[in-house]
Image (spheres, rainbow, N blue to C red):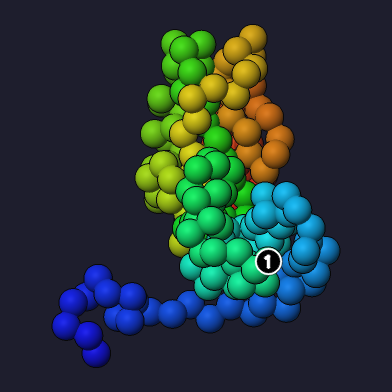
Amino acid sequence: MCAESNKECCKPKIAVDLTAANEILDQYRGKPGALIPALQKVQEHYRWLSQPLVEHIARELNMFLSEVYGVVSFYSQFYTSPRGEYTIQICRGTACHVKGSLRILEQLAAELGVEPGEMTRDGKFTVEEVNCIGACGIAPVIVAGGKTFGSLTVAQALAAIRNFDSGV
């Protein structure tokens, strides 16, 4: 055991089945410009990029770990914490804000027992606050599981999420 709790040797290791990652990375080994598409495909499968996954990707693509983390940390599309099966994005742009998206965000978060950016205990949902979805004409808007819901009341937003069998 090391003396300082923030040292790498003291952090718990996450066991990851790398079979799917290896199958994905087989398509990208030795190809220039392969990092971003490889990261996208690996994240699509695992829903997030854990430290062991990022380290494995760096090894398999023969890249420095700092290069891979540089890309992962630069682009907001990559996640380094667990994500739910469904992502719920609540638009907080001006049109949505004026039409009540804050109330929708607060109620969805309360119903699911999470704060924005967190995943529900059952792993079903991650709630995200986003700056603009680009659907101002149907404000307020949420995107859940890739489907856009607009002109929502709080009750309609809750009903839309319940259709994903969340147990709410």
Neighbour tally class for label 1: few under 14, some 14-19, many 20 plus, Cα within 10 Å = some
| Occupied quadrant, residue 64 | bottom right
- Residue located at (54% from left, 22% from top): 132
| The N terminus, quarter of image | bottom left
Residue 144 vertical position relative to residue 167 in the rendered view, above or below: above
Residue 151 vertical position relative to residue 11 in the rendered view, above or below: above
Label 1: which secondary element? loop
90 left or right, relative to 109: right
Residue 151 in percent (x, y) is at 61, 17
Q: Is residue 37 visible?
A: no
57 left or right, relative to 91: right
Furthest residue toward left: 3
Callout 1 amino acid: Leu
Residue 48 in percent (x, y) is at 57, 58
4 left or right, relative to 129: left
Out of 10 and 70, give the one closest to the viewer. 70
| Occupied quadrant, residue 145 | top right
Q: Is residue 1 visible?
A: yes
Residue that mark 1 sits on: 61
